[in-house]
Amino acid sequence: MLQIQPVSALRNYNKVLDKVKKDNPVFLTKNGYGKFALIDIE
């Protein structure tokens, strides 16, 4: 499942990091546009 969150969700970064799984990155948006991706380094 595609995980898309606003960058402001990083205020509670533990909740965001818990959603990052192998082969399932979390994409962060800023002002409605894709800006960052969090991936599992493994």
Image: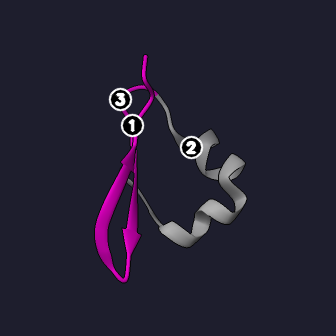
CA neighbours of label 2 inside 10 A, class few (<14), some (14 to 19), many (20+):
some
Does the image show residue 1? no
CA neighbours of label 1 inside 10 A, class few (<14), some (14 to 19), many (20+):
some
Mark 1: amino acid: Asn
The residue labelled by disc 3 is 23
Q: Along the polypeptide, which appears first: circle 1 or circle 2?
A: 2
The furthest residue to the top: 42
Marks 1 & 2, CB-CB < 8 Å contact: yes
Q: Secondary structure under badge 1?
A: loop
Look at 40% across and 36% down and name the residue there: 39
| Whether residue 41 is situated above or below residue 38 in the rendered picture | above
What label does residue 24 carry, if any? 1
- The spot of residue 17 in percent (x, y) is 60, 43
Closer to the camera, 18 or 8? 8
Look at 68% across and 65% down and name the residue there: 11
Task: Tell me the quarter of the picture where residue 34 sits.
Answer: bottom left
Mark 2: amino acid: Lys
What label does residue 19 carry, if any? 2
CA neighbours of label 3 inside 10 A, class few (<14), some (14 to 19), many (20+):
few
